[in-house]
Image (cartoon, rainbow, N blue to C red):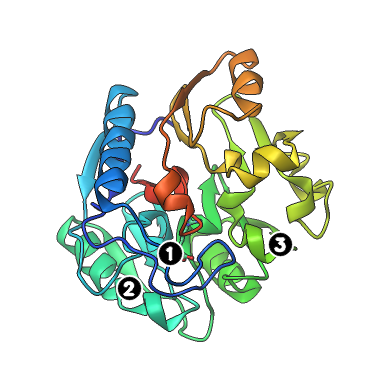
C-alpha cells in the first residue's frame, strides 16, 4: 500500500473566519505568509518522502478547502464525495467533485441526509472500511460507503468535540502499528480496532498537539511539531519520523494529515 500521489490545495485564501470546531476561535488572525511557508515545507517534505503532490485550485470563498483530507473517500479509481456537516464547507463539495471528475475518477455521491467528511473520518484498509462517527460523520454514511465499496465496516464512536475527526486522534503506519488517543473514543480501549492494528496510546500532551494527525508517506511519518513524544515511538518502530510545523493550521483545528489526501 505505497502512497505515490496525494492531493493538496494551496492556502492562499486560508483564514479562521467562522468556528465549526473548538480549535477555531472567531477573529483569530492567521499569519498567511507563515502559513504559506509552513504549507510549502509540508509539501516539500511529502515530495522528499517519495510522493507526487497534485493540487486542487484554491477558492476565495472556501477558507477550509486547504484541508483536502475532507474531500471524500477513495477506493481505486472510485471516489465518494463528502457531505459536509456545516454549511460553511458545503461549497467545497462541487470543487472536489469537479477535480476528481477532471482527473479520471468515477465520482459518486452518498445520500444527502448522511453527513460524511472523507479521510477525516474514514479510509479503506484492505477489505475493510475503518471509520468513526458521532461528531462530523454519521454512522449511516459509513455503512452506506461500506456497501458501495464492498468493504467490511469497522467503525467506532468519537467522544469529544475537540477530537472531531478520526484523523485527529488516530493514525496507522505501514508496520501495522497505530497511535491513538484513548480519551477521544467512547470505547477508550478501541477494542474494535484491536484485531487489525497494534494500538499504541499517546499522551494528552501529544494529543493536544495533534500528534495523531501526522501524515504517513510510506516509511516516513510527518509530525506537526518536534515536541511530540510519539516521534520516538515511531522511530523505535523502524519508521522515519519527520517534522513539518503547521502551527497556523492548528488555529483551524487541522494539522499535517488534514492538509492531504492519498490518491492511491
Ligand atoms: N477547520 C476545518 C474544519 O473544522 C479543519 C478540518 C480538519 N480536517 C481533518 N481532516 N481533521 O472542518
Q: Nearer the N terminus, badge 2 or badge 1?
A: 1
For label 2, count other residues whose C-alpha is less than 10 Å away and answer few (under 14), some (14-19) or many (20+). Answer: some
For the question of whether residue 155 can be seen, the reply is yes
Give me the C-alpha separation between circle 2 and circle 3. Answer: 24 Å
Which residue appears at 64% of the width and 46% of the height? 208
Q: Is residue 74 above or below residue 242?
A: below
For label 3, count other residues whose C-alpha is less than 10 Å away and answer few (under 14), some (14-19) or many (20+). Answer: many
Secondary-structure class at tag 2: helix
For the question of whether residue 129 can be seen, the reply is no
Residue 40 or residue 76, whichever sits in front: 40
Snapshot quadrant of residue 18:
bottom left
Q: Position of residue 147 (x, y in %)?
A: 55, 66
Q: Can you tell which of label 2 and label 1 is closer to the viewer?
A: 1
Give me the C-alpha separation between circle 1 and circle 3. Answer: 27 Å
Residue 71 or residue 22, whichever sits in front: 22
Rendered-image quadrant of the N terminus: top left
Answer yes or no: disc 2 within 8 Å of ligand 1. Answer: no
Q: Can you tell which of label 1 and label 3 is closer to the viewer?
A: 1
Answer yes or no: disc 1 within 8 Å of ligand 1. Answer: no
Residue 72 or residue 44, whichever sits in front: 44
Q: Nearer the N terminus, badge 1 or badge 3?
A: 1
Which residue appears at 23% of the width and 51% of the height? 10
Secondary-structure class at tag 1: loop
For label 1, count other residues whose C-alpha is less than 10 Å away and answer few (under 14), some (14-19) or many (20+). Answer: few
> For residue 28, which numbered disc appears in the image?
1
Q: Which residue is mark 3?
A: 158
> For residue 93, which numbered disc appears in the image?
2
Which residue appears at 37% of the width and 47% of the height? 260
- Say how many tags the image has: 3
Q: Position of residue 92 (x, y in %)?
A: 31, 71
Amino acid at each position: 500500500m505505497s502512497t505515490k500521489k496525494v492531493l493538496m490545495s494551496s492556502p492562499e485564501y486560508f483564514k479562521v473566519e467562522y468556528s465549526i470546531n473548538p480549535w477555531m476561535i472567531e477573529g483569530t488572525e492567521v499569519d498567511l505568509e507563515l502559513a504559506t511557508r509552513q504549507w510549502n515545507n509540508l509539501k516539500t517534505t511529502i515530495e522528499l518522502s517519495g510522493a507526487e503532490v497534485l493540487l486542487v485550485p484554491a477558492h476565495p470563498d472556501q477558507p477550509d478547502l486547504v484541508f483536502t483530507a475532507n474531500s471524500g473517500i477513495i477506493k481505486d479509481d472510485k471516489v465518494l464525495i463528502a457531505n459536509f456537516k456545516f454549511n460553511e464547507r458545503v461549497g467545497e463539495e462541487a470543487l472536489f467533485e469537479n477535480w476528481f471528475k477532471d482527473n479520471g475518477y468515477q465520482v459518486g455521491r452518498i445520500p444527502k441526509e448522511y453527513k460524511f467528511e472523507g479521510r477525516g473520518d474514514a479510509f479503506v484498509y484492505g477489505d475493510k472500511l475503518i471509520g468513526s462517527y458521532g461528531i462530523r460523520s454519521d454512522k449511516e454514511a459509513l455503512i452506506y460507503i461500506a456497501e458501495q465499496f464492498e468493504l467490511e465496516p469497522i467503525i467506532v464512536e468519537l467522544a469529544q468535540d475537540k477530537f472531531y475527526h478520526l484523523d485527529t486522534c488516530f493514525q496507522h503506519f505501514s508496520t501495522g502499528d497505530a497511535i491513538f488517543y484513548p480519551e477521544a473514543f467512547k470505547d477508550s480501549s478501541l477494542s474494535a480496532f484491536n484485531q487489525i492494528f497494534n494500538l499504541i496510546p499517546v499522551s494528552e500532551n501529544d494529543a493536544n498537539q495533534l500528534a495523531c494527525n501526522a501524515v504517513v508517506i510510506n516509511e516516513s511519518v510527518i509530525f506537526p511539531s518536534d515536541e511530540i513524544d510519539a516521534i520516538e515511538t515511531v522511530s523505535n518502530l523502524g519508521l522515519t519520523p519527520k517534522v513539518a510545523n503547521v502551527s497556523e493550521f492548528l488555529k483551524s483545528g487541522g494539522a499535517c494529515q488534514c492538509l492531504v489526501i492519498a490518491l492511491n
